[in-house]
Image: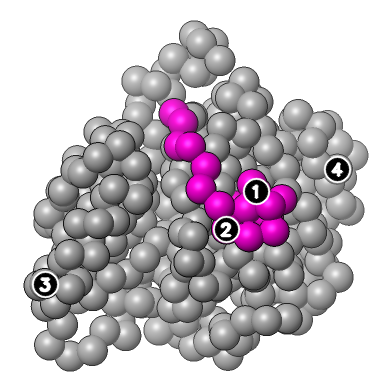
Amino acid sequence: MSTRIQLEDIQAARERIAPYIIPLQITESPSLSKQFSSNILLAHEYLQTTGAFKLRGAMNSVLQLEPGTTGVTAVSTGNHGRALAYSAQQAGVPCIICMSELVPRNKLEAIRTLGAETRIIGKSQDEAEVEARRLVSEEGYTMIPPFDHAQVIAGQGTLGLEMLDQEPDMDTVLVQLSGGGLISGIALAIKSQKPEVRIVGISMERGCAMAASQKAGKPIEVEELPTLADSLGGGIGLDNQLTFDIVHDTVDEIVLLSETEIADGIRHAYFKEQVILEGGGAVGIAALLAGKVTPGAKTIVLLSGKNIDMELHHKIINGEGH
Protein backbone atom coordinates (compact mmCIF):
# COMPACT_ATOMS: atom_id res chain seq x y z
CA MET A 1 0.00 0.00 0.00
CA SER A 2 1.71 3.19 -1.18
CA THR A 3 1.21 5.92 1.37
CA ARG A 4 3.19 8.28 3.53
CA ILE A 5 0.63 8.08 6.33
CA GLN A 6 1.00 5.27 8.85
CA LEU A 7 -1.34 3.95 11.51
CA GLU A 8 0.94 5.59 14.11
CA ASP A 9 0.26 9.02 12.55
CA ILE A 10 -3.49 8.49 12.95
CA GLN A 11 -3.09 7.25 16.51
CA ALA A 12 -0.95 10.31 17.37
CA ALA A 13 -3.58 12.58 15.79
CA ARG A 14 -6.24 10.99 17.97
CA GLU A 15 -4.38 11.93 21.14
CA ARG A 16 -3.53 15.41 19.84
CA ILE A 17 -7.08 16.45 18.90
CA ALA A 18 -8.93 14.69 21.73
CA PRO A 19 -9.38 17.85 23.87
CA TYR A 20 -11.04 19.67 20.97
CA ILE A 21 -13.46 17.19 19.42
CA ILE A 22 -16.63 15.34 20.34
CA PRO A 23 -16.13 11.54 20.30
CA LEU A 24 -18.02 9.68 17.59
CA GLN A 25 -21.44 8.36 18.57
CA ILE A 26 -22.68 5.22 16.82
CA THR A 27 -26.27 4.00 17.10
CA GLU A 28 -28.36 1.41 15.30
CA SER A 29 -30.96 2.53 12.76
CA PRO A 30 -34.02 0.38 13.55
CA SER A 31 -35.74 1.43 10.32
CA LEU A 32 -32.81 0.65 8.00
CA SER A 33 -31.88 -2.53 9.88
CA LYS A 34 -35.42 -3.80 9.48
CA GLN A 35 -35.65 -2.75 5.83
CA PHE A 36 -32.41 -4.54 4.87
CA SER A 37 -32.53 -7.42 7.39
CA SER A 38 -29.05 -6.39 8.46
CA ASN A 39 -27.37 -4.53 11.31
CA ILE A 40 -27.17 -0.93 10.00
CA LEU A 41 -25.35 1.49 12.29
CA LEU A 42 -25.28 5.27 11.95
CA ALA A 43 -22.10 7.19 12.87
CA HIS A 44 -23.24 10.65 13.99
CA GLU A 45 -20.25 12.82 13.11
CA TYR A 46 -22.49 15.82 12.31
CA LEU A 47 -22.58 16.31 16.11
CA GLN A 48 -19.05 17.75 15.84
CA THR A 49 -18.64 21.34 17.10
CA THR A 50 -18.53 22.77 13.56
CA GLY A 51 -21.26 20.46 12.29
CA ALA A 52 -19.02 18.20 10.19
CA PHE A 53 -16.06 15.81 10.31
CA LYS A 54 -13.60 18.37 8.92
CA LEU A 55 -12.68 19.61 12.38
CA ARG A 56 -10.52 16.53 12.97
CA GLY A 57 -8.13 17.12 10.09
CA ALA A 58 -8.03 20.90 10.46
CA MET A 59 -7.31 20.74 14.18
CA ASN A 60 -4.61 18.11 13.74
CA SER A 61 -2.89 20.38 11.21
CA VAL A 62 -3.20 23.64 13.16
CA LEU A 63 -1.85 22.00 16.33
CA GLN A 64 1.34 21.12 14.40
CA LEU A 65 2.05 24.57 12.93
CA GLU A 66 5.57 25.95 13.25
CA PRO A 67 5.90 28.65 15.95
CA GLY A 68 5.54 32.17 14.58
CA THR A 69 3.32 31.20 11.64
CA THR A 70 1.76 34.29 9.97
CA GLY A 71 -1.60 32.58 9.63
CA VAL A 72 -3.43 29.78 7.85
CA THR A 73 -5.38 29.72 4.61
CA ALA A 74 -7.34 27.20 2.57
CA VAL A 75 -9.67 26.77 -0.36
CA SER A 76 -13.00 25.40 0.79
CA THR A 77 -16.54 24.47 -0.25
CA GLY A 78 -17.54 25.44 3.28
CA ASN A 79 -17.02 22.73 5.88
CA HIS A 80 -13.21 22.68 5.77
CA GLY A 81 -13.17 26.46 5.96
CA ARG A 82 -15.45 26.38 8.96
CA ALA A 83 -13.30 23.76 10.66
CA LEU A 84 -10.07 25.62 9.92
CA ALA A 85 -11.57 28.90 11.15
CA TYR A 86 -12.58 27.22 14.42
CA SER A 87 -9.20 25.51 14.81
CA ALA A 88 -7.32 28.75 14.12
CA GLN A 89 -9.51 30.60 16.62
CA GLN A 90 -8.73 27.96 19.27
CA ALA A 91 -5.01 28.31 18.56
CA GLY A 92 -5.04 32.11 18.25
CA VAL A 93 -3.85 32.09 14.64
CA PRO A 94 -5.13 34.41 11.83
CA CYS A 95 -7.18 32.62 9.15
CA ILE A 96 -8.26 33.56 5.59
CA ILE A 97 -10.59 31.20 3.69
CA CYS A 98 -10.76 31.46 -0.12
CA MET A 99 -13.95 30.23 -1.78
CA SER A 100 -15.79 30.22 -5.09
CA GLU A 101 -19.18 31.82 -5.73
CA LEU A 102 -20.83 28.36 -5.51
CA VAL A 103 -20.40 28.11 -1.74
CA PRO A 104 -23.78 28.42 0.06
CA ARG A 105 -24.30 31.64 2.03
CA ASN A 106 -25.00 29.82 5.30
CA LYS A 107 -21.52 28.25 5.20
CA LEU A 108 -19.94 31.61 4.34
CA GLU A 109 -21.57 33.33 7.31
CA ALA A 110 -20.62 30.50 9.66
CA ILE A 111 -16.94 30.94 8.75
CA ARG A 112 -17.09 34.70 9.34
CA THR A 113 -18.78 34.15 12.70
CA LEU A 114 -15.71 32.16 13.79
CA GLY A 115 -13.48 35.18 13.20
CA ALA A 116 -11.92 34.20 9.89
CA GLU A 117 -11.73 36.44 6.84
CA THR A 118 -13.45 35.12 3.68
CA ARG A 119 -12.48 35.94 0.11
CA ILE A 120 -14.82 34.99 -2.74
CA ILE A 121 -12.99 34.47 -6.01
CA GLY A 122 -14.37 33.10 -9.29
CA LYS A 123 -16.70 30.25 -10.05
CA SER A 124 -14.52 27.27 -9.10
CA GLN A 125 -12.22 25.97 -6.40
CA ASP A 126 -9.31 26.27 -8.83
CA GLU A 127 -9.85 30.02 -9.23
CA ALA A 128 -10.10 30.49 -5.48
CA GLU A 129 -6.87 28.54 -5.04
CA VAL A 130 -4.90 31.20 -6.96
CA GLU A 131 -5.59 33.70 -4.17
CA ALA A 132 -4.75 31.16 -1.45
CA ARG A 133 -1.40 30.43 -3.13
CA ARG A 134 -0.68 34.17 -3.32
CA LEU A 135 -1.23 34.46 0.44
CA VAL A 136 1.33 31.70 0.92
CA SER A 137 3.97 33.07 -1.48
CA GLU A 138 3.59 36.80 -0.73
CA GLU A 139 2.32 37.00 2.84
CA GLY A 140 3.80 33.90 4.47
CA TYR A 141 0.56 32.09 5.26
CA THR A 142 0.51 28.31 5.69
CA MET A 143 -1.81 26.47 3.31
CA ILE A 144 -3.88 23.74 4.93
CA PRO A 145 -5.69 22.08 2.04
CA PRO A 146 -9.01 20.31 2.62
CA PHE A 147 -7.90 16.78 1.74
CA ASP A 148 -4.55 16.17 -0.01
CA HIS A 149 -2.44 16.72 3.11
CA ALA A 150 -0.91 14.12 5.42
CA GLN A 151 -1.94 15.81 8.68
CA VAL A 152 -5.50 16.37 7.43
CA ILE A 153 -5.81 12.73 6.33
CA ALA A 154 -4.44 11.50 9.66
CA GLY A 155 -6.95 13.67 11.51
CA GLN A 156 -9.89 12.36 9.50
CA GLY A 157 -8.55 8.83 10.03
CA THR A 158 -9.27 9.11 13.74
CA LEU A 159 -12.89 8.36 12.79
CA GLY A 160 -11.79 4.93 11.58
CA LEU A 161 -10.08 4.22 14.89
CA GLU A 162 -13.23 5.17 16.80
CA MET A 163 -15.38 2.98 14.55
CA LEU A 164 -13.09 0.00 15.15
CA ASP A 165 -13.05 0.58 18.90
CA GLN A 166 -16.83 0.61 19.11
CA GLU A 167 -17.73 -1.94 16.42
CA PRO A 168 -14.73 -4.28 15.94
CA ASP A 169 -16.85 -6.80 14.04
CA MET A 170 -18.13 -4.36 11.39
CA ASP A 171 -17.66 -5.58 7.83
CA THR A 172 -18.75 -2.63 5.67
CA VAL A 173 -18.32 1.14 5.99
CA LEU A 174 -20.09 3.70 3.79
CA VAL A 175 -18.06 6.89 3.54
CA GLN A 176 -18.47 10.18 1.69
CA LEU A 177 -16.13 10.62 -1.29
CA SER A 178 -14.98 14.03 -2.47
CA GLY A 179 -11.31 14.95 -2.53
CA GLY A 180 -10.61 11.75 -0.66
CA GLY A 181 -9.17 13.00 2.63
CA LEU A 182 -11.95 11.52 4.73
CA ILE A 183 -12.18 8.13 3.05
CA SER A 184 -8.36 7.85 2.80
CA GLY A 185 -7.91 8.39 6.52
CA ILE A 186 -10.73 6.05 7.50
CA ALA A 187 -9.61 3.33 5.08
CA LEU A 188 -5.99 3.50 6.26
CA ALA A 189 -7.04 3.35 9.92
CA ILE A 190 -9.35 0.40 9.39
CA LYS A 191 -7.57 -1.64 6.71
CA SER A 192 -4.20 -1.47 8.46
CA GLN A 193 -5.87 -3.46 11.27
CA LYS A 194 -8.73 -5.27 9.51
CA PRO A 195 -8.01 -5.44 5.76
CA GLU A 196 -11.13 -7.51 5.12
CA VAL A 197 -13.50 -4.61 5.95
CA ARG A 198 -15.21 -3.31 2.79
CA ILE A 199 -14.89 0.45 2.25
CA VAL A 200 -17.49 2.00 -0.06
CA GLY A 201 -17.05 5.58 -1.30
CA ILE A 202 -20.24 7.47 -2.09
CA SER A 203 -20.68 10.69 -4.01
CA MET A 204 -22.96 12.46 -6.48
CA GLU A 205 -23.28 11.91 -10.22
CA ARG A 206 -23.00 15.66 -10.83
CA GLY A 207 -19.27 16.28 -10.86
CA CYS A 208 -17.47 13.75 -8.66
CA ALA A 209 -13.86 14.42 -9.63
CA MET A 210 -12.38 11.49 -7.69
CA ALA A 211 -14.68 8.92 -9.32
CA ALA A 212 -13.91 10.29 -12.79
CA SER A 213 -10.19 10.38 -12.01
CA GLN A 214 -10.13 6.78 -10.78
CA LYS A 215 -11.90 5.72 -13.96
CA ALA A 216 -9.37 7.64 -16.05
CA GLY A 217 -6.43 6.20 -14.11
CA LYS A 218 -5.07 9.65 -13.24
CA PRO A 219 -6.28 12.93 -11.70
CA ILE A 220 -8.46 14.84 -14.17
CA GLU A 221 -10.61 17.96 -14.05
CA VAL A 222 -14.39 17.68 -13.95
CA GLU A 223 -16.87 20.50 -14.42
CA GLU A 224 -18.31 21.64 -11.08
CA LEU A 225 -22.11 21.58 -11.08
CA PRO A 226 -24.67 22.67 -8.51
CA THR A 227 -25.69 19.69 -6.38
CA LEU A 228 -27.51 18.93 -3.14
CA ALA A 229 -24.23 17.33 -2.05
CA ASP A 230 -22.39 20.65 -2.37
CA SER A 231 -19.87 19.71 0.32
CA LEU A 232 -18.64 16.91 -1.98
CA GLY A 233 -17.91 19.28 -4.86
CA GLY A 234 -14.54 20.45 -6.14
CA GLY A 235 -11.59 18.91 -7.93
CA ILE A 236 -8.90 16.63 -6.52
CA GLY A 237 -5.98 18.61 -7.98
CA LEU A 238 -4.11 17.56 -11.11
CA ASP A 239 -0.94 17.32 -8.99
CA ASN A 240 -2.67 15.20 -6.33
CA GLN A 241 0.03 13.74 -4.08
CA LEU A 242 -1.79 11.41 -1.69
CA THR A 243 -5.51 10.79 -1.89
CA PHE A 244 -5.76 9.59 -5.50
CA ASP A 245 -3.37 6.71 -4.78
CA ILE A 246 -4.81 5.90 -1.35
CA VAL A 247 -8.35 5.75 -2.75
CA HIS A 248 -7.09 3.52 -5.58
CA ASP A 249 -5.39 1.17 -3.09
CA THR A 250 -7.97 1.03 -0.29
CA VAL A 251 -11.50 1.80 -1.53
CA ASP A 252 -13.40 -1.29 -2.66
CA GLU A 253 -16.36 0.35 -4.43
CA ILE A 254 -17.41 3.81 -5.60
CA VAL A 255 -21.12 4.61 -5.90
CA LEU A 256 -22.63 7.73 -7.49
CA LEU A 257 -26.09 9.09 -6.76
CA SER A 258 -28.64 11.23 -8.58
CA GLU A 259 -30.04 14.40 -7.03
CA THR A 260 -33.36 12.65 -6.45
CA GLU A 261 -31.61 9.84 -4.56
CA ILE A 262 -29.69 12.33 -2.40
CA ALA A 263 -32.94 14.12 -1.56
CA ASP A 264 -34.46 10.77 -0.55
CA GLY A 265 -31.54 10.29 1.84
CA ILE A 266 -32.10 13.72 3.41
CA ARG A 267 -35.80 12.97 3.83
CA HIS A 268 -35.20 9.54 5.37
CA ALA A 269 -32.72 11.01 7.86
CA TYR A 270 -35.27 13.57 8.93
CA PHE A 271 -38.45 11.50 9.07
CA LYS A 272 -37.05 8.12 10.16
CA GLU A 273 -33.89 9.01 12.11
CA GLN A 274 -34.92 12.50 13.32
CA VAL A 275 -31.67 13.94 12.05
CA ILE A 276 -31.03 17.03 9.92
CA LEU A 277 -28.29 16.31 7.37
CA GLU A 278 -26.79 18.20 4.46
CA GLY A 279 -26.82 16.41 1.11
CA GLY A 280 -23.24 15.19 1.43
CA GLY A 281 -23.95 13.92 4.93
CA ALA A 282 -26.90 11.83 3.74
CA VAL A 283 -25.33 10.00 0.78
CA GLY A 284 -24.67 6.78 2.73
CA ILE A 285 -28.33 6.45 3.65
CA ALA A 286 -29.25 7.45 0.09
CA ALA A 287 -27.04 4.76 -1.45
CA LEU A 288 -28.74 2.06 0.63
CA LEU A 289 -32.23 3.32 -0.17
CA ALA A 290 -31.39 3.49 -3.89
CA GLY A 291 -30.24 -0.13 -3.86
CA LYS A 292 -26.78 0.90 -5.05
CA VAL A 293 -24.99 -0.64 -2.06
CA THR A 294 -25.66 -4.07 -0.62
CA PRO A 295 -25.08 -3.85 3.14
CA GLY A 296 -22.94 -6.35 4.97
CA ALA A 297 -23.92 -8.16 8.17
CA LYS A 298 -22.81 -5.10 10.16
CA THR A 299 -22.62 -1.88 8.16
CA ILE A 300 -21.57 1.54 9.47
CA VAL A 301 -23.05 4.52 7.61
CA LEU A 302 -21.14 7.74 8.25
CA LEU A 303 -23.34 10.82 8.64
CA SER A 304 -20.64 13.38 8.02
CA GLY A 305 -22.28 16.80 8.27
CA LYS A 306 -25.43 18.82 8.95
CA ASN A 307 -24.56 22.25 7.54
CA ILE A 308 -27.48 22.63 5.14
CA ASP A 309 -29.36 25.83 4.39
CA MET A 310 -32.54 25.33 6.41
CA GLU A 311 -34.82 26.83 3.78
CA LEU A 312 -33.49 24.30 1.30
CA HIS A 313 -33.93 21.52 3.85
CA HIS A 314 -37.53 22.60 4.40
CA LYS A 315 -38.22 22.41 0.65
CA ILE A 316 -36.64 18.96 0.36
CA ILE A 317 -38.55 17.39 3.23
CA ASN A 318 -41.75 18.87 1.84
CA GLY A 319 -41.05 17.24 -1.51
CA GLU A 320 -40.58 20.51 -3.43
CA GLY A 321 -38.15 19.78 -6.28
CA HIS A 322 -35.96 16.70 -6.46
Exactly how many numbered labels are in the figure?
Answer: 4
Q: Which residue is mark 4?
A: 294
Q: Residue at x 12, y 54 (%)?
A: 117
Q: Secondary structure at mark 4?
A: loop
Q: Position of residue 85 (x, y in %)?
A: 23, 60
Three-letter code, disc 2 = Pro
Q: Residue type at mark 1: give it.
A: Ala
Residue at 51% over, 48% down: 221
Residue 194 colored in magenta in the image: no
Residue 290 point in image, percent of width and height: 76, 29
- Residue labelled with disc 2: 219
Q: Which residues are magenta?
A: 210-226
Which disc is residue 138 wearing? 3
Whether residue 280 is visible, yes or no, is: no
Which of the 4 image quadrants contains residue 226?
top left
| Residue type of the residue flagged with mark 4 | Thr
